[in-house]
Amino acid sequence: MELSALLGLVLLLLHVPQNHATQGILHAVGDGGSNSAKDYCITYNSSWTSLPTSYTNAVYYKLQNITSVWLCSDPEVPSISLKDKAVVVMFGNCSILDKAMIAQNHEAKMLLVASKDGLPRPTDNRSGYESLTIPIAYVKYGDIAGMEQDVGTNIEVTMYSPSPPLFDYSMLVIFLISVFTVALGGYWSGVSELEDLRPSQSTGENDGGKKKDENVTFTPFTVILFVVICCVMLLLLYFFYKWLVYVIICVFCVASALSMFNCLSALIQYIPYGRCRVSCFSKSAEVRLVFLAVFCVAVSVTWAVFRNEDRWIWILQDILGIAFCLNFIKTLRMPNFKACVILLGLLLLYDVFFVFITPFITKNGQSIMIEVAAGPSGSTEKNGENYLEVPPDSQATFEKLPVVIRVPRLEYSAVKLCVMPFSLLGFGDIIVPGLLVAYCRRFDVRFTSASTYYIACTIGYAVGMILTLVVLIVLSMGQPALLYLVPCTLLASSVVAWRRKEMKKFWNGGCYEIMEQADNTVSEENIIRGEAQDAP
């Protein structure tokens, strides 16, 4: 398998369970006349701080701006009283929780940490700070610096976080995209299997061999090796993120452009135009395929250039992501159900370990999977003991891995102030179960006259996605989708094999046919030998 394909596979195994970083609103009121109130975006940790859903009945505190200090030790506390005030300090030089403890010890009622480099995610380890009770949030330094000009003096502030709706239409879009991609990828894999089963054309068997070489078959050993490589790559990304993220972005651009070309070229064959060929450097290609290649490269390059533009670039990322998933589901082949069980089982353990277990290992109490998939927290860079100064209210964005299908949440009131919130689904949550769906489709093509296994496994995937969304709504926090998709798809396909009394054949897959032929050959040889011995 090529290096780009291997790295592309690692991309699909990064899931994005939602962390506790939440967007909220800082409501400021001053004495500036008719324009004496304004809202500002903040980020806070919902597991640390519980905010009201509206500022109507919220408690206001007088704002005390002491951004000239870090507030990392008692000697830094200014001589002015902090009692019953909302204190604003600079971000950096020590933990946000240390700042909050000092502020609380001086009877402050709220801590706002001003950041000059965007809005970080509050992810510090809370253990050892059980007595900390005051609300904590990050705010942009530029908002604090311009607040007096916006609302006047004698500023009072409060924080609130409007409740997002229980169900957002983005969830339905995510569901439809995932089920459509899995179903279409499985069907396309079955079409490819039918083409491989057809007798070779008289024009030459080399073409058929080339076609089959485009596919990659996993064995149980390569499955285990692949999961080990994924673990190593995830750890490398965790420790060397700021360098490897650009490598992954480049790989995604190349892999998604190739995937889109493969997907569209399968459809363009039915268009009876542009079949004339052009030659260059002793190579020839159809005109329509040349234009298609240019189009796919243009889409990929456009995404790469505008990848941090959240308002519309998610459309291109989703299109490229769907093509990426479809191509891998069609290209990667599981030889039998045994390999599927090993792959899905190991990846389920992989998911659970790096999401739920690693928070007990890492220093900041955050899971490795979330740290890698969500990108850097937005903290400023260190130069020795001091933080590098950046322009106030920097709009710098932080590179994130292109590993998800993203759909904006339209019904969320903080969208006008904060970065547009998205509903997310990792590529791995589509491709990993999709490989089982594709195997079921190919098994139907080889051994059944219907699409029983394929339909059952696709329905199992849809049920798993519904279960994921239901748990997401009930618990109000993101879920690792494989935790529900793996059992549902494995159970659905196993029930069909058990009811049809084909579990042995389904378990061994294509190897079963070879085993049967070998057994028949051995039986025939034994019969011939027996007849020879009986002969006079």
Image (cartoon, rainbow, N blue to C red):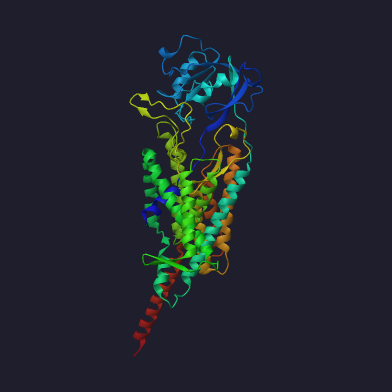
In the depicted view, which residue is nearer to us: 497 or 393? Answer: 393
Q: Residue furthest top?
A: 79
Q: Position of residue 191 (x, y in %)?
A: 52, 66
**Image quarter in which the N terminus is found:** bottom left
Q: Left or right: 140 with respect to 523?
A: right
Could one spot residue 130 in this view of the protein?
Answer: yes
In the depicted view, which residue is nearer to us: 274 or 174? Answer: 274
Q: Quadrant of residue 385?
A: top left
Q: Residue at x 41, y 12 (%)?
A: 75
The relative height of residue 368 versus residue 201 in the rendered view (above or below) is above
Q: Position of residue 154 (x, y in %)?
A: 58, 14
Q: Quadrant of residue 284?
A: bottom left
Q: Position of residue 432 (x, y in %)?
A: 48, 52
Q: Left or right: 490 with respect to 60?
A: left
Q: Residue at x 38, y 85 (%)?
A: 531
Q: Position of residue 99 (x, y in %)?
A: 45, 20
In the depicted view, which residue is nearer to us: 270 or 156? Answer: 270
User: How many numbered markers are drawn?
Assistant: 0
Could one spot residue 435 in this view of the protein?
Answer: no
**Image quarter in which the C terminus is found:** bottom left
Q: Residue at x 40, y 57 (%)?
A: 220
